[in-house]
Amino acid sequence: MARVVNNKELVSTRLATNYGGWMYCDKCNENIGYLCYATYDRLKLSYRCNCGSQGKVILDFVDSKMGQECNDELTIVKNRFCCLGDNSPLITILDKKVTSYEMEITCKACNKIYKKRRNESIS
Ligand SMILES: [Zn+2]
Ligand SMILES: [Zn+2]
């Protein structure tokens, strides 16, 4: 069933469909990750693409819940971040395509808010 988007903000980023699928940097057209359509409830993502462009994605739905912050780590299955509790596949960030990112993603099944960040590595 299609969901009704409430907030949607895309900065220098394109999405393959209305609220999911492959995510592309608008400047260099590289895909930087994949957002699973049906399993997240809210997403806030900001990243710096390898090309230097700073992108941002904010998405939620009219029926999104507030969610509960947690200290759990997302699990990784075949480079996809998944909910630790119910194994819902949530999002893939392609590590090799971005130099840094910060995200908050809420699992629709259990309403946990996962936070994840990767800082720019200092070489
Ligand atoms: Zn780029
Ligand atoms: Zn969950």
Image (tube, grey):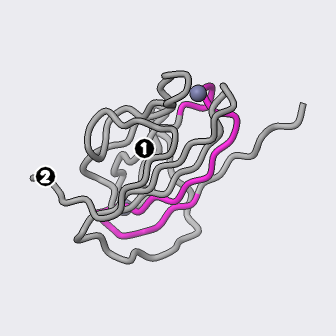
Q: Position of residue 96 (x, y in %)?
A: 63, 25
Q: Is residue 87 magenta?
A: no
| 2 on left or right of 87 | left
Measuring 17% from the left and 57% from the top, which residue is drawn there? 3
Q: Is residue 96 magenta?
A: yes
For marks 2 and 1 on the same chain, the one whose residue lies earlier in the sequence: 2
Q: Disc 1 marks which residue?
A: 91
Q: From what the image shows, is residue 118 above or below residue 83?
A: above
Q: Position of residue 7 (x, y in %)?
A: 35, 63
Measuring 26% from the left and 44% from the top, which residue is drawn there? 18
Residue 98, located in which quarter of the rendered image? top right
Which one is closest to the eye, mark 2 or mark 1?
2
Q: From what the image shows, is residue 107 above or below residue 29?
A: below
| 78 on left or right of 21 | right
Dot 2, how many residues are within 10 Å of its Cα: few (below 14), some (14-19), or many (20+)? few
Q: Disc 2 marks which residue?
A: 2
Q: Position of residue 66 (x, y in %)?
A: 38, 77
Tell me the SS state at disc 2.
Answer: loop
Q: Which mark is residue 77?
A: none
Measuring 33% from the left and 51% from the top, which residue is drawn there? 88
Tell me the SS state at disc 1.
Answer: strand
Measuring 88% from the left and 37% from the top, which residue is drawn there? 122
Give the quarter of the figure containing the C terminus.
top right
Most foreground residue, 7 or 34: 7
Q: Residues in magenta? A: 94-115
Residue 4, located in which quarter of the rendered image? bottom left
